[in-house]
Structures are given as structure tokens and as C-alpha cells.
Image: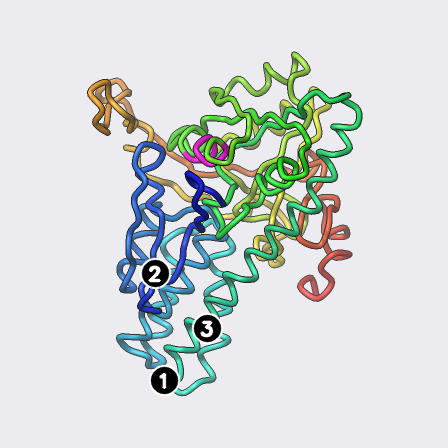
Amino acid sequence: MWVDDEHYRSLWVADDSWTIEIIDQTRLPHEFMIVSLVTLEHAIHAIKTMQVRGAPLIGITAAYGIGMAMRVDSSDAALESAIARLQATRPTASNLAWALEEMRQRLAPLQPEERINAAYRRARELVDHDIMTCKSIGAHGVELIRDIAKRKDGKPVNILTHCNAGWLATIDWGTALSPIYRAYEDEIPVHVWVDETRPRNQGAALTAWELGKHGIEHTVIVDNAGGHLMQLGLVDICIVGTDRTTAGGDVCNKIGTYLKALAAHDNGVPFFVALPSSTIDWSLESGADIPIEQRGSEEVSHVYGLTDDGAVGRVDVVAPGSEVVNPAFDVTPRHLVTGLITEQGICGASREELTKLFPVQAG
């Protein structure tokens, strides 16, 4: 997508054909910094510290991490060690396990000397697949926005989203934001309510930055304002992303998503979830079985921002001595989900409906 009239993706291969370059998302929105990843250790660090985040992008970064590992040691033991270490970085996002299994299947049958080039080729294929998938999600999801626009007689469609599920969370286009970008291109008037998304403020820092760079009208709100806006009739549709969706239709996404779904259900606002099929965990029926990542207390107790003197600094906001807990995700049960927007179309949040769209994966 676009940053100051220049096209960027969230990750790309450098001119040397080996180094991976990323946008350091921990520095946004106040600093735009590109970081080079050269080793497996770099890839692990980028995922753990959330320099890269978002389920699809995590998976692709890990895929390139395998390639980096193979440049040092392409033995069977090194391959399995790299897969295990990358898998341990973020436990909730299913795209990570999916991408690593794709790499295992491609590389394990090969001779060690063939694995370096094959790893980079397969990672590139996953990049291309992600871009096409996200564009398709946008093409299907925009029809929901278009239908609402027809009833609004030229007034903007008000869309509420949570966390960041835009191009920064994928390679390009995004998942939940892809229908919004497509609507903007189709000249459908839209306005986005952007949840700040505590504790890391990915909405205020990343989604708002994305939308602003693209010229899309948006307003940042505190996390707890969504229900109030729905009561006032100021939200036409909710579209969020997901880090793992069960075969039964339960949706795991950034903490706070469940509360938005409850408010939407109570106010009759459609609640849709946009996801690539790689995010579906066909081995799980219930969201209760999804491992929820517990992150460090400092993400809650401290906030980063731009100070009055123009420096980026950290501020402690919690009373001294107070304990902090920081679950990174919650689960929205299927009965609160109006529908799932996938690359194959829109369906209900159930195994039966998902199987109709993805019979091969389901089998």
C-alpha cells in the first residue's frame, strides 16, 4: 500500500536476494524505520518483540527465517530446530504453524544443499499467495459495504474495527481493512472508527497510521466507546481480523474483540470477521482449546508515545505495587459472529459453512 506516495509492503527481499527487510512496527506511528533481518535469530527477535505482527505476516517472516537458518546449516537437525524455535515465538496465531509446516513439507524431502534456494522460493510463493488472498478478501467484503452504502443515500458507511488487520499485518492489503481499501478505490464513501486497542495501541498507532497515509477518513476512539457508538446508531458494520479461527467458527482475536461482538449483537450491528483460510485451525472445534498468549506486564503498565519535546518516550501509568495480567487475545463464540469473510467468499461461522468453501482443507 502507500506511504507518502511511495508503495511499500510490510516485508520484502533486499537487493542482495537474501536479506529480508521489514518496517519496524514498534516504532510507528512516530518513526518510520526499516530493519534488516539476516539470521534466524533476527527473525525470532522480530516476531517476539512484535517488530512484525499480525498472523499472516508472522507466518511469512517465519518462513523466511527458515531460509536464513538453512544458509548457516541445512541439515535435517537444523531444519527441525529452526521450525521448533520459530513455532515457540507466538503460540496463538495459527498462520505461524501453517507456514512452518509448508516449509517442512517443501524442504524435508530435499538434499541439504538444495534447501537454501528452495526455502526462499517457497517463502516467496507464500508472499504471492498472501497478496492474492487478501485482495480476494477485499473483493468479497466490499460487497457488504456496498450494500450498506446503497441504503445510506450517499452518506459514509461507518465501519468499526479493532486492533490492526491491515497491510501491516499481512504483506499487502490486509484482511479486515482490505474491504475498506477496496471500497475507497471504488469511491464508496466510508468512515472508520478505529479502536485504540490497548495495551499496545495497535489501532491508534498502526491502523490510524495506515488509513491516514492512504487518505481514508477515520476517527480514533477509546476501546470502551464502541458500544456507546452502536447505541447511537453510528456504527453500520464491524469488521475485525483473527489470529486463529476454529473449524466450528469460534474466533480468536486481539483482546477486546469479544466485547465489541457482544455490543454489536445487543444493538443489531453486523459483526464480520475477515480471515485467510490459513488462519482456520481445522483440528479445533471450540475456541476454549486455543492457547492464549500471556504477554509481559510492561505492555500494560507502560505506554510509549511522543513527548512534548518531540522525543519518543515511555511512561508508567499503573499504581506502584499493583499486579498486572496481560492476555493478548480473547475468543468470540460463533453465535456472535454474523459471518466470515474469506478468500473464497462469505460464509456463516460454523464447520458446515466453512466446509462448503474449503472442502479439501476440511477433509
Q: Label 1: state its secondary structure.
A: helix
Q: Amino acid at mark 3?
A: Arg
Instruction: Indicate which disc, 2 or 1, sits on the residue closer to the N terminus.
Output: 2
Task: Kindly report the distance in space between the C-alpha atoms of the residues bearing marks 2 and 3.
Answer: 13 Å
Query: What is the count of numbered marks?
Result: 3
Q: Residues within 10 Å of mark 2 (few under 14, many from 20)?
A: many
Q: Would you name the residue on which mark 2 appears? A: 20
- Residue 201 percent coordinates (x, y): 40, 30
Q: Would you name the residue on which mark 3 appears? A: 121
Magenta span covers which residues?
206-211
Give the main secondary structure, helix, strand or loop, of the magenta stretch: helix
Give the answer, above or below, for where 331 lies relative to 35: above
Q: Residues within 10 Å of mark 1 (few under 14, many from 20)?
A: some
Q: Is residue 134 left or right of residue 323?
A: right
Q: Label 2: state its secondary structure.
A: strand
Q: Is residue 62 left or right of residue 55?
A: left
For marks 3 and 1, give the one nearer the viewer: 3
